Image: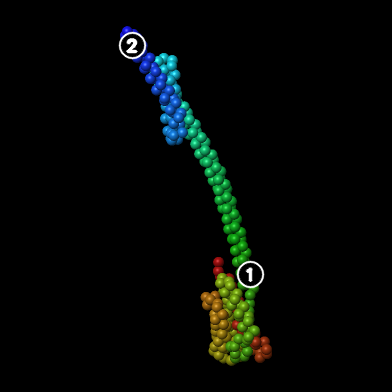
Amino acid sequence: MDDTLNHQLETNMNIKIISFALFIATSSNLLANEIPHNDQQAHQEATQGGIGLLAGSLIAGPIGAIIGGSFGVMNGHQQSQAETISEQQQLIQTQQQSISTLETELSEIIVQITQANTDTQLLAVKLKQEQHTYIDDLNQFANSYQFDIYFLTNSSDIHPQAKQGLDKLSQLLQRYPQLRADLESHSDWRGTADDNCLLSKQRLSKVNNHLTQSGVNPSQLLASNYGEQNAYDNSSWNEGLLYDRRVTISLSYFGN
């Protein structure tokens, strides 16, 4: 009687365990679409555990159910870990590809910067050469320039044609502030030395004022009055005295 009762209890327990295993195995599949993506590992482990529980119940009863369920959970957990490792490997591979792309772009940028630096250095050398050429040309022009303004006897009035030359000189000096104009005023020998010096000074003042009023910087003008000291003709009365009644303008380069 006791054996029959025990056998019936054992049979009922096995039925309950198998039913519970079937419920776990089937409910995990039915609820698969309702489990969030982040809970897929738990879902897989529950599924494997239910299958292991069912297999253990069929093979070895309650104890087998417990052992089978445990092995099922372990198997599900191992599969979940394998999937996680695979996802991490894919993520690492993607990051490595991104790093490789960035390194390529960085290398291209470095090449561009190097080329830009080389171009800048070449441009600086070329600019320096052109600057030297410019200075040499300007200096050569200044050394060859001379402009003489002639005056009538006892007059400091500037002839209209001479004013046109002064206007061109004014434009030149304003365009090239590195140039300096040296103004040297003279007179012929006739008259007293004091009168000739005063007349020469008036001529010099007229020329200097014309240039400054035209826009020339006064610092570019160097005025010198010589009177009759440097006269070409110191004795005759001929027309050659015209060349002594003059203001001579020469240029010099004094800038960098």
Q: Are marks 1 and 2 in contact (CB under 8 Å)?
A: no
Give the quadrant of the C terminus.
bottom right
Residue 217 pos. (x, y %): 53, 76
**Res 219 visible:** yes
Residue ID for mark 1: 140
- Judge left or right: residue 189 versus residue 19: right
Q: Amino acid at mark 2?
A: Leu
Q: Amino acid at mark 1?
A: Gln
| Local SS, label 2 | helix
Residue 238 drawn above or below residue 77 = below
Nearest the camera: 206 or 25? Answer: 25
Residue ID for mark 2: 5
Residue 148 pos. (x, y %): 63, 81
N-terminal-most mark, 1 or 2: 2
Q: Residues within 10 Å of mark 1 (few under 14, many from 20)?
A: few
Residue 5 pos. (x, y %): 33, 11
Residue at 44% x, 22% y is 51
Residue at 63% x, 82% y is 164
Please name which of the two marks, 1 or 2, marks the residue nearer to the observer. Answer: 2
Q: Image quadrant of residue 227?
A: bottom right
Nearest the camera: 197 or 58? Answer: 58
Residue 45 drawn above or below residue 224 = above
